[in-house]
């Protein structure tokens, strides 16, 4: 039995749902030990390989929970250690004890979080190649994986076509939405510049994108070319997409978020068109207003709404997963 500690980013509930969806799809059997704040601890019957962690958009670090801290493997090596405190009230006595143990047993360098903070960032851990320990309540975990910030940053800020003024969907949120769908082929009928398509293709899925604006389709095409990928792209209104595309299991999309006037009716028309054609729909909405209406149309609310918003954001994203009751 393996014990893992997962550290999530800014959307713990969404990140937890993503992790559970991915592990379930890979037939991992797990038992939740504790979920508090942005930390989830689980028991898992099997070893989870690194490639599973690499699929996740919402997980920042993964640690293996240990009974005792054993430094014997580091004796005679030049190692730098780090520590992050994940408990709401930091217990600096544990940190001091760990520091003393490291210096006594192997004399390694010990890196603490910046003044006023309790955690080391993934950037620091990776760039300084730290052996990090995570302290949470009465548990200690050794960090075994950190999110590849360079890879995510490249796709977020390096792509040639961006539209900052419309509030772009962050790649990590797009990835989480894709993982919630758990489908090998997805359609984004509001594809814009192609963020969801890029994330789907990055993890080896099949993706189709459509948008009623031909300029957006061209922007998406350029971003996919930059990524070294390609996908079927077509100009089409989302309320008519089922007449164009049928051999797809899931829709993953961020619909128009504003201005709000008339948007609810747009979403309703979309769900009417998608009924009986797509099994799973993962969608980011500006409000939960239409959820009950969609349920009355024969859809089941599988999970959500999960709220995502950047600091100082005017519009919040409400991410929901619907299943068509036809299936």
Image (tube, rainbow, N blue to C red):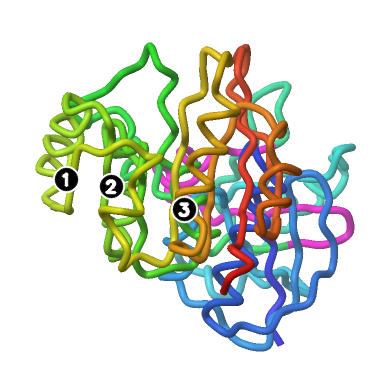
Asked if residue 243 lies in the magenta stretch, the reply is no
Q: Residue at (52%, 68%) from the top-left corner? A: 74
The correct choice, above or below, for 305 with respect to 203 in the image is above
**Residue 158 location (% of width, % of height):** 23, 30
Circle nearer the viewer, 1 or 3: 3
SS at badge 2? helix
Q: Judge left or right: residue 271 versus residue 217.
A: right
Q: Judge left or right: residue 175 versus residue 260.
A: left
Tell which circle, 3 or 2, labels the residue nearer the N-terminal end.
2
Q: CA distance from mark 1 to mark 3?
A: 29 Å
Q: CA distance from mark 3 to mark 2?
A: 23 Å
Tell which circle, 2 or 1, labels the residue nearer the N-terminal end.
2
Q: Quadrant of the C terminus?
A: bottom right
Query: How many numbered callouts?
Result: 3
**Residue 71 location (% of width, % of height):** 62, 69
The numbered disc on residue 274 is 3
The foreground one among 172 and 242 is 242
The foreground one among 121 and 43 is 43
The correct choice, above or below, for 177 with respect to 92 in the image is below
**Residue 280 location (% of width, % of height):** 52, 61
Q: Judge left or right: residue 283 versus residue 291.
A: left
**First to last magenta residue range:** 119-140
Circle nearer the viewer, 2 or 1: 2
Asked which quadrant contains residue 120, the reply is top right
Q: Residue at (74%, 52%) from the top-left corner? A: 39
Q: Can you identify the residue that label 1 sits on? A: 227
Asked if residue 126 lies in the magenta stretch, the reply is yes
Q: Residues within 10 Å of mark 2 (few under 14, many from 20)?
A: many
Q: Residue at (35%, 65%) from the top-left corner? A: 248
Q: Can you identify the residue that label 2 sits on? A: 198
Question: Mark 2–mark 1 contact, CB under 8 Å?
Answer: yes
Question: Mark 3–mark 2 contact, CB under 8 Å?
Answer: no
């Amino acid at each position: 039995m393996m014990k893992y500690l997962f550290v999530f980013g800014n959307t713990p509930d969404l990140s937890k749902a993503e992790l559970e969806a991915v592990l379930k799809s890979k037939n991992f059997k797990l038992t939740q030990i504790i979920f508090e704040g942005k930390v989830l601890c689980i028991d898992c019957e099997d070893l989870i390989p690194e490639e599973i962690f690499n699929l996740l958009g919402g997980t920042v670090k993964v640690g293996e929970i240990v009974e005792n801290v054993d430094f014997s493997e580091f004796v005679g090596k030049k190692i730098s250690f780090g520590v992050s405190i994940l408990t709401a009230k930091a217990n600096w006595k544990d940190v001091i004890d760990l520091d003393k143990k490291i210096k006594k047993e192997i004399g390694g360098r010990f890196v603490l979080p910046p003044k006023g903070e309790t955690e080391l960032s993934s950037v620091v851990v990776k760039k300084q190649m730290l052996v990090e320990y995570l302290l949470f309540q009465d548990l200690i975990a050794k960090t075994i994986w950190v999110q590849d910030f360079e890879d995510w940053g490249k796709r977020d800020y390096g792509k040639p076509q961006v539209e900052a003024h419309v509030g772009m969907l962050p790649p990590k949120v797009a990835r989480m939405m894709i993982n919630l769908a758990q489908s090998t082929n997805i359609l984004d009928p509001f594809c814009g510049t192609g963020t969801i398509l890029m994330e789907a293709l990055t993890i080896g899925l099949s993706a189709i994108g459509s948008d009623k604006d031909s300029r957006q389709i061209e922007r998406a095409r350029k971003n996919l070319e930059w990524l070294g990928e390609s996908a079927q792209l077509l100009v089409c209104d989302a309320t008519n997409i089922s007449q164009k595309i049928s051999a797809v299991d899931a829709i993953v999309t961020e619909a128009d978020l504003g201005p709000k006037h008339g948007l609810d009716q747009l979403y309703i028309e979309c769900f009417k068109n998608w009924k009986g054609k797509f099994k799973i729909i993962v969608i980011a909405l500006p409000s939960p207003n239409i959820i009950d209406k969609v349920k009355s149309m024969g859809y089941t609310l599988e999970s959500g709404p999960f709220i995502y918003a950047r600091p100082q954001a005017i519009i919040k994203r409400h991410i929901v997963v619907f299943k068509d009751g036809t299936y």
